Amino acid sequence: MSLEHILHEMRLFKSAEELKLMRRAGEVSAAGHVKAMQVCQPGLYEYEIEAELIHQFVKHGLRAVAYPSIVAAGKNACVLHYTDNDGKLKSGDLLLIDAGAECDHYAADITRTFPISGRFTEPQRALYELVLDAQLAAIEQIKPGAAWHLAHDASVEVLTRGLVKLGLLKGRVPKLIKDEKYKQFYMHRIGHWLGMDVHDVGDYKVDKEWRLLEPGMVMTVEPGLYIPADCDSVDKKWRGIGIRIEDDVLVTAEGYEILTSAVPKTVAEIEAVMQGG
Ligand code: GLY
Ligand code: MN
Ligand code: MN
């Protein structure tokens, strides 16, 4: 008999001891992201920001990254698994960072997106706040007994509604969702199990039905919007903007606990940290 499935189920449910390691991975990774916001300025290269993240991880005793860091300025953020990290940071662009450290083999997986100059432009702010609303709505779905897909569906609903309001999609929201029109700008799932691997083992469906969440499971919640630079179906001001916001969320008996909440997330919090607040 293959032990694989039994082992994967064991990995899906975290013990108190494992959660200590995941909280530490989350805290230290958060420190790396805060540092990146503090040192960010136009003229630096993406790899210089990557170096700051790794410096923080190692300085706190976590000497392994959970996965290759993504540091993507401007339209590079629209490339989902961008890891070249050799572009120059330009004032007026956003910087998307997806990076996490490992603590005794347990991963953190955090994404933040912020303005290189320290202040969001109006179009950037509008799309950012939409992604944030989608993330918060998705996180609110997380509790024991909730089916796995509810968080994803919540993000799709909020993003589609917002894209219509801002004029990037045209039509009726239920039909746009049914026709998956949002997928041209939001083409991945809401998240994945997290643990010893960044995309950890564990079934997402049981008997073809979406799995119900249970205490001890940890998943990422990471909606995004990626407007290709050559997308001529939308106004110029939106083109080339890529935004993702990702946190690591533990299912608890009462609902959820965010393991990565130490990184600023609202527009006001991000702008304050970048202005030295
Ligand atoms: N860092 C990989 C992911 O977010 O899934
Ligand atoms: Mn992830
Ligand atoms: Mn990630």
Image (tube, rainbow, N blue to C red):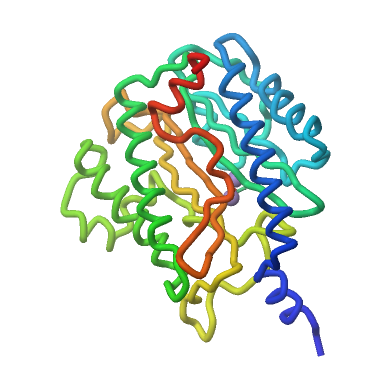
The quarter of the picture where residue 228 lies is top left
Figure check: 202 above or below 86: below
Residue at position x 64%, y 22% in the image: 46
Figure check: 72 above or below 13: above
Residue at position x 72%, y 57% in the image: 197
| Residue 203 located left or right of residue 253 | right
Of 84 and 161, the residue lying toward us: 161
Residue at position x 72%, y 80% in the image: 5
Quadrant location of the N terminus? bottom right
Of 154 and 59, the residue lying toward us: 59
Residue 34 x/y as whole percent: 59, 28
Return the residue found at the far top: 43
Residue 187 x/y as whole percent: 45, 51
| Residue 37 located left or right of residue 130 | right
| Residue 112 located left or right of residue 158 | right
Figure check: 156 above or below 184: below
Residue 40 x/y as whole percent: 58, 17
The quarter of the picture where residue 4 lies is bottom right
Return the residue found at the far bottom: 1
The quarter of the picture where residue 6 lies is bottom right
| Residue 267 located left or right of residue 108 | left
